[in-house]
Amino acid sequence: MSDTINENLTITVIVPVYNSQEYLQECINSIKNQTYTNLDIILVDDGSTDSSGKICDDAANKDERVRVIHKKNEGLVAARKTGINSARGDYITFVDCDDYIDLDTYEQIVNNISDIIPDVIAFGLIEEYPDDSIKNINKLASGIYEKSDMEKNIFSRMLSFGDFFQFGILPNLVCKLIKRSFLEYHPPKVSDAVTIGEDVDMTYQMLLNANTLQIINIAPYHYRRHQSSMMFQKVELEKLKILEKDLRSTFDCMDSEYSLDKQLNSYIKFVYLLKHPETILGKKFDFSNKKIALYGAGGFGQAFHQCYSQNVVIWVDKNYQRYDSVKPADALKERVEKYDMIFIAILNVAVCEEIKNTLYENGIRKPIIYYKEEL
């Protein structure tokens, strides 16, 4: 991209804020202190009841690039729409209020933007756990994709890259830059009632409508994982049905040659397993009157434990220190007489196979099962 365009490009950064006083200041500082300074920063206070609103106002008083919008609590989708409607930048991006970004994030991105000024720019992120960091980048190759390239190489693999729940393009909205003029022409048709899968709903709508996409395989965004994250929260079954309806209404309008229905069905199963696993597992397994040793305490493991808590007699994970009531995997051998079977609550089949083989090698002789999606 030319230096002239570099100097003139403005990025609107939208931060939906709700009761995040513990992390909010670090989040705001990571945006305000960017090496790329041509920013329009919008903090949307979605009816916070803690000190988050004051933290936002203090930030605006100290930096003229920061604007604050105080509104009643209506949820993340509505807060994002509010920010979009007030944006002034050439590009729009998002940062969640409990996350943070590298200080050269937008400098890296702007320096790599193609001269064609793509509708959507996709990059990666790092999942930050208390004791570990996991880098996630897009599975598809970096570079510029015009509409014909997207139809040929993106659409058929963006939601499912082959293995169950492996995305070709990361669904996270926070690792996207979207041209404002494109959003004005294609405003997000995401129901405010969607409280799970909001990013998937908006991201893949955008990609299907975009004429150009650029993938930059850097990961400057830090996505904080903690026990209060939405990943670990129970969601009403009706909310999942709203998400599914929203997605199907979008995908049904597209050409079937891109295997969108197949990808969407796989994703919907993934979401149900993470939030209401009984709707999927109940058709494949009979857990009645079984004493279960549960292996896995991530999103799937947490959901399984909530659903089948009366059956789970021991819960283990290799990262047991992160969670309450979770033991190290060695406890399976020490308490083998307590359970009838082991359920591995992990959605990567290769990892499940590895764990199963390791347990058998260590002398475990109880039945070991896990979910395997038929692709």
Image (cartoon, rainbow, N blue to C red):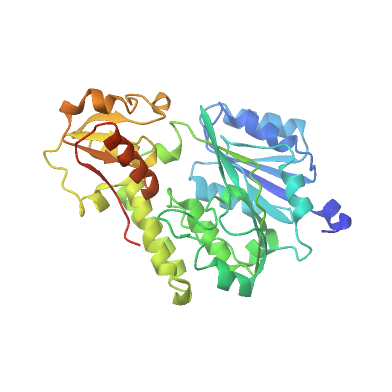
In this orientation, does residue 348 appear? no
Q: Is residue 39 left or right of residue 83?
A: right
Q: Position of residue 273 (x, y in %)?
A: 33, 49
339 versus 142 height, above or below: above
Q: Position of residue 116 (x, y in %)?
A: 76, 66
Q: Front-most of 17 and 340?
A: 340
Q: Position of residue 92 (x, y in %)?
A: 67, 53
70 versus 349 height, above or below: above
119 versus 371 height, above or below: below
Q: Is residue 74 left or right of residue 120?
A: left
The residue positioned 21% from the left and 53% from the top of the image is: 284
Image quarter of the C terminus: bottom left
The residue positioned 37% from the left and 47% from the top of the image is: 347
In this orientation, does residue 108 appear? yes
Q: Front-most of 145 and 33?
A: 145
Q: Front-most of 366 and 1?
A: 366
Q: Front-most of 343 and 356?
A: 356
Residue 154: name its quadrant.
bottom right
Q: Is residue 67 left or right of residue 254?
A: right
Image quarter of the N terminus: bottom right
Residue 268: name its quadrant.
bottom left
The residue positioned 70% from the left and 63% from the top of the image is: 118
Most extreme residue toward the right, as rendered?
4
